[in-house]
Image (tube, rainbow, N blue to C red):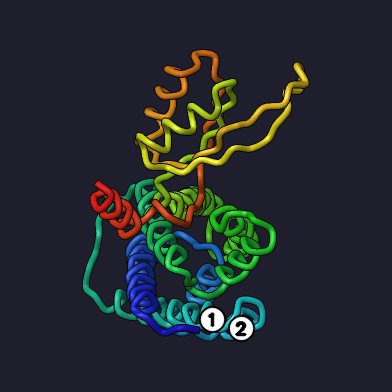
Amino acid sequence: MRINKQFFINCIMIFLGASIFSFGLVNFNMANKLAEGGMTGIALIIYNLFSINPALTTLVLNVPLILIGLKLLGLEPLILTLVGSLSLSLNLWLWQKVPLAISVDNDILIAALLAGICGGFGSGIVYKYGGTTGGTDIIARIIERRFGMTIGRSLFALDVVVLLLSLTYLSLKEMMYTLITVFVFSRVVDFVQDASYGAKGVFVVSDHDREIGERIMSELERGVTYINSEGGFSKESRQMVYCVASISEMSRIKEISYEIDPRAFMTFFNINEVTGEGFTYKELQEIHEQAKKQK
């Protein structure tokens, strides 16, 4: 494991995300008697039944799952998980000490939406920087790595089990509003994670594939890949142009393709993550500096 500048940035952002999550939990979930999923939800069940502070129970309940995380996730993810778990417990304790009361005019729907937004935004930041807040977050991250299911969706499934247990202290009405919170939470988590990747992919099928590819590379400075393919109806062999570019550049790729071949067939699709040359400020800066030197 390497201890570098990025590692410390990750730790700071994980702490910030845990703070936002804890703020929503204290001021919207606990203040309006809304449940929560995962290990935090179990901590709220214990809090409502036995009056034990969630700041303590979340830390204690996370210990066995963190040990599982050590075996399955490796050392660095474990350390980031420890940072997330400790940050969650600390911020839960701090926000309960802050004399702050946010009024929603007794509108539990608004409280449910705000709880989902705060929780999802905070947790999304934690996941985005490689951490978890412990609990079922560890299980969700393992599911993401092993089966490719997004963290938001796997958390939603795991939360259902915990929410059913929350009926021990919630009415059916409060439970239904909690389901709204959990759904919004899962959507916001995925949004925060996906929003960092402002890229889309495109396949272009055309008899003028080389010309289209050359224009894309020369005008947009984006690399292309030519993929061998065969028409299912015509049985003709040809090459598809494959390119990943920023969302704002997709319209220009479309224009270039249609200028060269009005009958070009294009398929655009979302990219959840992209790494490599051309998708960070530093790399783009190097490309432009090299271009200036060549001139």
Residue drawn at (59%, 37%), measured in percent from left and top?
226
67 to the left or right of 81: right
Q: Quadrant of residue 239?
A: top right
Q: Residue at x 37, y 74 (%)?
A: 6
Q: Is residue 243 above or below residue 55?
A: above
Q: How far is disc 1 from disc 2 in space, using C-alphas? A: 6 Å
Q: Quadrant of residue 164?
A: bottom right
Q: Is residue 153 visible?
A: yes
Q: How many marks?
A: 2
Lateral position of residue 240 relative to residue 28, left or right: right
Nearer to me, 182 or 273:
273
Q: Position of residue 55 (x, y in %)?
A: 42, 80
Please state which amino acid type lies under the numbered disc 2. Answer: Leu
Percent x, y of residue 50? 51, 80
User: Within 10 angstroms of label 1, few (less than 14), some, or many (20 or more) residues?
Assistant: many
The kind of residue tagged 1 is Leu
Which element type, helix, strand or loop, lies under badge 2? helix
Where in the figure is residue 79, as x and y percent of width and height?
49, 83
According to the image, label 2 marks what residue? 70
| Residue at the far top in the pictured view | 262
Q: Position of residue 294 (x, y in %)?
A: 28, 49
For the residue labelled by badge 1, is the local secondary structure a helix, a strand or a loop? helix
The numbered mark at residue 78 is 1
